[in-house]
Amino acid sequence: MANYDHKTIEAKWQNRWEKRRAAEIDLSNSRNKYYMLMMFPYPSGDRLHVGHGRNYILGDALYRFLRMRGKRPLNPMGWDSFGLPAENAAIARSVHPRDWTLGNILVMKEQFKRWGILYDWSKEVTSCKPDYYRWNQWLFLRMFEQGLAYKKRAAVNWCPSCQTVLANEQVVEGRCERCRTEVVQKDLEQWFWKITDFADRLLAGLDELSGWPERVKTMQRNWIGRSEGAELDFRVPAIDETLTVFTTRPDTVHGATFMVLAPEHPLVERLLGDSERDQEIRTWVEGMRNTPRLEREGEGVAKTGRDTGAVAINPATGEEIPIWLASYVLPDYGTGSIMAVPAHDSRDLAFARQEGLSVRLVYHPDGEDVDAETIEEPILHKGVIRNAGPFDGLRDGEGTVEKFIAWAEEEGFGRAKVTYRLRDWLISRQRYWGTPIPIVYCDSCGIVAIPDDQLPVELPYDVEFTGKQGNPLSRSDEFVAVTCPECGAGARRETDTMDTFVDSSWYFLRYLSANDDSRMFKRETAEAWMPVDQYIGGIEHAILHLLYARFICRVLHDFGMVSVEEPFTNLFNQGMITRYSEASGRVEKMSKSRGNTVSPDKLIEDMGADTERVYTLFLGPPEDEVEWNDDAVYGAYRFLNRVVRMQQRLAEAPATGIADEDLERLTHKTIERVTRDLEKFKFNTAIAALMEHLNGLSRALEDKSASRLVCDESFDIMLRLLHPMAPHLTEELWEQRGHSDSLLDVDWPDHDPSKLVTDEVELVVQVNGKLRDRVVVPADANETRVRDLVLASDRVSRYLEGLEIARMIFVPGRLVNFVVRKKG
RNA sequence: GCGGAAGUGGCGGAAUUGGUAGACGCGCUAGACUUAGGAUCUAGUCCCGCAAUCGGGGUGGGGGUUCGAGUCCCCCCUUUCGCACCA
């Protein structure tokens, strides 16, 4: 039997939807609004593969479902189109990044269309275009005014391969998040955004996000890394300075037997003299500075250190303790220096043992005589405090830490302090293809902001892409040479561009005012449409993009531009699609570099986009990682072909049917299941329900047990339920069945509970929990009646022979369980 | 090491949240049919007991709660994803 003509049908409906601008929505009406958002893609030169498709197909199915259910969903799309690959393509193939990018966008758009995906293209946003990135610049200037954007010299992450600095979030296990090259530290002056000011709010906000996956929230909490403790001051008499440390355990200060500074600590130089030994220490410090952090801090890396020879005074005991430098103290956490309490901290203990430093117990375990000089493992605050004056006898907990903080405050050598792991967001990039930072350096005026009316600062088109060191912008005299907006003298333009994560930190607001040249976005529209009701994207942005977007949303909130602080109410992370890779011999994430991709182009050519859609959604729970099976795709095609054949066979149904109620029950059961499943994004089980429905309908036709009327009705309902998954075919069949409205405008069916009711139900009968029989009983039978009916079964009575029924469990509509024991 | 998620047939996965384990699909087996198509249709397909409509076992392993556990609790194993000298 011939397969249906998916090519003609799909082209026909894609063109119709496009022509009628099916997904365009009027934002001035926010009744029943539902803002759904797919993470906007980077338009890479590679065609999308079926692994990418999962995300978009899922979103489109959701869009169509919501729409049929009476929502007015906004489903926009745009392009996260600044970034390195464009520049690399320029270097490798001498195409201009802009032309390359805009060309790729056209290709991707066509692919979306071929998948049957409906976006509201009237609100398209392209981040590499001046009408978008001028608002990045505008935002930068507002933040600059507020002190939220600032420039500082600091040790920053530098990727030697990408030739640019990176934010902390973009360094994964010491490597560049993009290209996996090992990152090195460089001392540079860079632009930062003050996300640390928002650490507490970003943390607290997570508690309200009940619609976010727990693991994403956990990852963000860990990233922010809030830590409560105290700052304590240690005097260094030799240079008349104070060394301040951060500790979460000020209650162990009596056990601080030495101090450790990070090699980069600003006081190091002052502690050193001219001796040969001190010169050696300087060499060592220099070596540390130049050691990649992975080698310095990585797992299993040995601790190294040097004794400065200087001493500090322990403020609790008044004793002199040596000051060391060591690799294990991080320069950019806390104060970059610690009090070492080897008795109660494993790292300090390891270092103390290695260097022969003394160890002193503060907490003494109960009923155990512990010798501080020989312990191999730290005592983690077990037992009772001794030799600490007024604190003797205290135990861990019970506000002990607070008592020490109060004491330190009274004595003036310390104070309560909260520290975060989070660092300010380094947004400078030494690359061409990004938003120019709207700043000018003037010899007399210093750092000068570009006035708003001179925005956008456009990227010059005509630059050289040589692949040589440095940003092409800095070699463009035309771009660099400006007059100072304040004094009119000659000045230099900032040539760093912004991290592309700036673009994606607010694009969801730009969709709401995509064509408005007068402002970043319209407040009233944002008021009506924010927050995003459902955000869908990959887990890889759990920290990066999602943290930045939450940050910028708060900044805009504080500017009075939007009232929400949390931009995304619900977050859904679809899982990856994997496939066997010849290259590695393993099942891995589908990707071009692994050579295990499947192109949708051929698949669509052979079996149609609806087949790909149905198969992709059927593969498994959308949040799980699933393996693509080339053979199993055909099952989806087979299913759709059966739907087509079913339509052709409907005429075989008789005028009256003896079992109409059975088919109706199945139909309404299917409505109930599919609706419930789609509400939970369980497209896989929704499709299974539809397959079962088709099987049931097929059976009814085969048996001629249901009437034409009921079969028609059942089939039409199936088309509506299937539409989100297989939109082209269902539209076509719907039209062929004589309906004039597009399924997009047809209501989702409701199930009628009265159709689900049956006169009789099958009960499972168990004896001591073992399945022994199934018995059909009237649906409304009470426990006594059921007992009689069940006991009348031969099979049941066989199992009860010679036994005494101790108890009968009756779960109406489900089962009966006899608890029996030997007659005694 | 810390934290999260998961472990069910040959395979992808279901199981109305404590009530028939294996829905649906892939694959496989047998048959029917054919205008040979990537056909289609019908039946079967967790394991063991030669076969069964009968019996036993079965959701990573071990214990427990319960009339009843894939589901809840405890211990262990494995996989996987974050974080990882953060003081």
Image (cartoon, grey):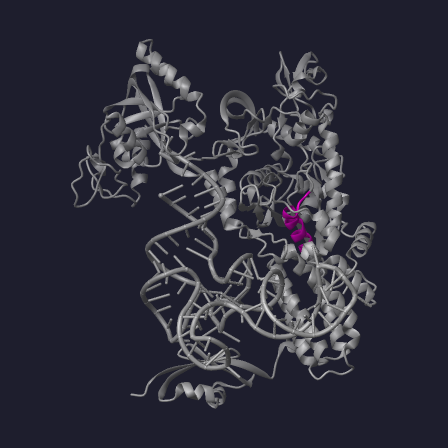
Image position of A446 with respect to A401: above or below: above
State the predominant SS element of the stretch in magenta: helix
Of A645 and A440, which appears nearest the observer? A645
What percent of the width, then of the height, locates residue A706? 72, 79
Residue sitting at x 67%, y 32%: A82
Establish if A550 lies above or below A489. Answer: below
Which of the image's four quarters has the N terminus of chain A? bottom right
The image quarter in which residue A276 lies: top left
| Magenta-drawn segment | A48-62
Residue A794's x, y, as percent? 47, 89
Residue A193: % across, % down? 56, 30
Q: Is residue A586 left or right of residue A513?
A: left
Q: Position of residue A20 (x, y in %)?
A: 82, 52
Q: Nearer the viewer, residue A686 or A740?
A: A686
Q: Was residue A698 drawn as part of the magenta stretch in this picture? A: no
Does residue A557 appear in this view?
Answer: yes
Q: Quadrant of residue A191?
A: top right
Q: Residue at x 41, y 76 (%)?
A: A769
Q: Quadrant of residue A695?
A: bottom right
- Residue at (76% x, 57% y) in the render: A728
